[in-house]
Amino acid sequence: MSSNGYTLITVAKCDPGYLSKALEHVGVLAAELKSQAGALGTRHGVISTGEHAGSMVLFQFYSELNGIDRAFDVYGSSDAYQALIGSGKISVTLRNIGKMEDLGLKNTAAETPAYGVLTRWRSATPMTERMAPLVHLFEDNGAMVLRYGTIMTGSDAGSRLLGVGYPSMDAIEKTYDALRASKGYMDIIADIELDFRNIFRYAG
């Protein structure tokens, strides 16, 4: 399945006591982005590991950059977004745009995954021709969605970003066991500069 296009990624710190309410507002905002900005899809959740642990993350998927422009118009008119910002209990710490490659699972699940793994690295080229033969290892071990692209904005512009959704932690473990047994994967690891690999939990 092709997954190219653009992804807008937003990370926001949140007061732990406000997290449940904040996720409710993000769920409403996500529906507005799909109906008013033309988002092809959205996913949101809470980052579990790394420097942004405990922060919320929102992914928005668009076929063209104009959709991201429309998203900011939605922010301006959305009661849910204004409630989030006006609460004084969240602060946006990161917002970047990614250009996605034509690389994905043959069958992307319609259901919301339970967990996601987000990996960022630096490499001279996107290496899609080397990554394509590895996609089945994700799918064979339970991955529900896979998106891969290059960050276009911010201090990490040019870095590669791989996001994969899974139904369980067990599926994550099985996938990485299979990857570590793959020469193609180990060759890629040797040729890149890995920045992070973090887990997040989906909320919608």
Image: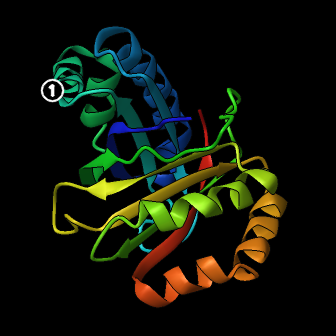
Classify residue 50 as left or right of residue 159: right
Label 1 secondary element: helix
**Residue wearing tag 1:** 69
Res 169 visible: yes
Q: Position of residue 2 (x, y in %)?
A: 49, 35
**Vertical placement of residue 201 versus 181, above or below:** above
Please report the residue visible at 37 percent of the width from the left and 22 percent of the height from the top. Answer: 39
Q: Position of residue 159 (x, y in %)?
A: 29, 68
What amino acid is labelled 1 in the image?
A: Asp
Q: Quadrant of the C terminus?
A: top right
**Vertical placement of residue 191 versus 140, above or below:** below
Question: Among all residues in the image, which is located at the extreme bottom?
Answer: 190
Question: Among all residues in the image, which is located at the extreme top?
Answer: 35
Question: Residue 176's image quarter?
Answer: bottom right
Classify residue 184 as left or right of residue 166: left
Q: Quadrant of the N terminus?
A: top right
Please report the residue visible at 42 percent of the width from the left and 87 percent of the height from the top. Answer: 191
Mark 1 surroundings within 10 Å by alpha-carbon count, few (fewer than 14), some (14 through 19), many (20 or more) = few
Query: Which of 67/93 is in front?
Result: 67
**Vertical placement of residue 21 versus 169, above or below:** above
